[in-house]
Amino acid sequence: MTATPAHSIDAFDPLDPQTLQCPHPWHRALRTHAPVHFVAARGMWFVTSRDLVAKALADHDTFSSAFGLPQMPIPDRIKAEVEAITAQGWPPVPTLLTADPPEHHYYRRMLAKAFTPRFIARLEPEIRSIARELVAALPDGAPVETIERFAAPLPLRVIATVLNVPGDRIHDFKRWSDQFTATVGGQLDDAGLLEQARNMVEFQRYFAARLDDRRADPRDDLLSGLVTAHSMDNQDEPLSTGAILNIIVQLLIAGNETSTKLLGGVLHELAREPRLWAELRERPAERAADIIEEGLRFLSPVQSMFRITKAEATLGDYTIPAGQLVVLVFGSANRDQEIFTDPDEFDPDRPNAKAHLAFGAGIHACLGAPLARLESRIALEELAARFGTLQLDRDNDFAYEPSFMLRGFQRLSVVCTEGERR
């Protein structure tokens, strides 16, 4: 996809509805003409080349993660009302995504004690069982909305399993997840922001009660691992309820919403290219891993992440003053033509696909990356085992969620037709 003269970098607005639907020409224009660009109307600096995004990720002393919430500020006209609602719950605690060392190292270490490779590996049979159940429920030869019926429920149920959320609360779990992501790189009206605040308090009260249960009666689950992590070596203070609640929110978004967007985008690409689907059916384990890796690069479900400069910063030929909000655009870095040949083509045979930054890098690299890869690979394997063909339905508008930070389809209708069972 080539930038056109219409994509003048001075006109770039990350929240413009048309830009949200197709940011790639803008990103290419920015990489070419101004890989570090200040958008005065939004008060944000956008970094778009892979080299400079990687440099900023590596320099956490200058590019701080202590930027607050990953969303636009609450308008002054309802700020007091929002604060009155949230005062009924727990105040936000900067932990993984929004903390710098040494606090960040403490929280990451505590989560790593509970969220171990062994813990993730134990989930594989349950993930495969959920995926197989969802695949079996898809119609043969009829249009099906795959986001609602497959791409959303699979990671939602997996992360619910991780957090030991019972089946009768799955709908609440989904509602909370949708609410929390609505302002990640997007905007809500006043009523929506107030509803979001009410949902946050409801979520906090539910999980705070579960944490109290685990402190009294630990089980073999992640919540118990978090409340008991300090006791593994007796070198750390226990995690507070507020800190664990913040970590759970991040797990909910990172372990659910991003995987939904990855799966939806990958299914779109596979439905467009029958050759890739045939290869997946012939060699599911091998091709599924390659397809998912290229999907991470090409789709970049986490399109960008904030940083704030603690001091004057230099990136390439550009100087960013201290105290500035910086947006590291992973989606642009992952399509940098200086790194990836034909970057706007979906190519699972790309030899350097793993050079992507879809999971970030450095001290903030995503701890949940192995789980995301595992559940996405299993999802493709189970779909390929049942269906011989995958085709896009005519009833698609291919509209994306209105966010410059989380990118994925709102809906995707596909016709899946059974083939010989693999």
Image: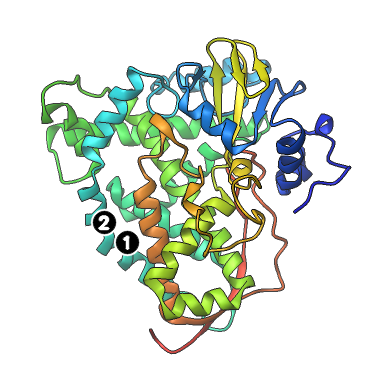
Q: Can see residue 74?
A: yes
- Tell me which amino acid carries mark 2: Leu
Instruction: Give the numbered dot on residue 52.
Output: none
Task: Give the left or right position of residue 355, taking residue 167 as reference.
Answer: right
The structure residue drawn at horizontal position 55% and vertical position 10%, both measured from the top left corner, is 311
Q: Is residue 406 above or below residue 43?
A: below
Q: Which residue is mark 1?
A: 127
Q: Position of residue 326 (x, y in %)?
A: 61, 24
Residue 133 visible, this orientation:
no
Q: Which mark is residue 123?
A: 2
Please tell me whether mark 1 sits on a helix, a strand or a loop.
helix
Q: Judge left or right: residue 267 versus residue 239.
A: right
Above or below, 352 relative to 80: below
- On the picture, is 8 further left or further right than 176? right
Q: Check disc 1 and give the amino acid type.
A: Ile
Q: Position of residue 275 (x, y in %)?
A: 57, 78
For the N terminus, the image quarter is bottom right
Q: Position of residue 363 (x, y in %)?
A: 38, 29
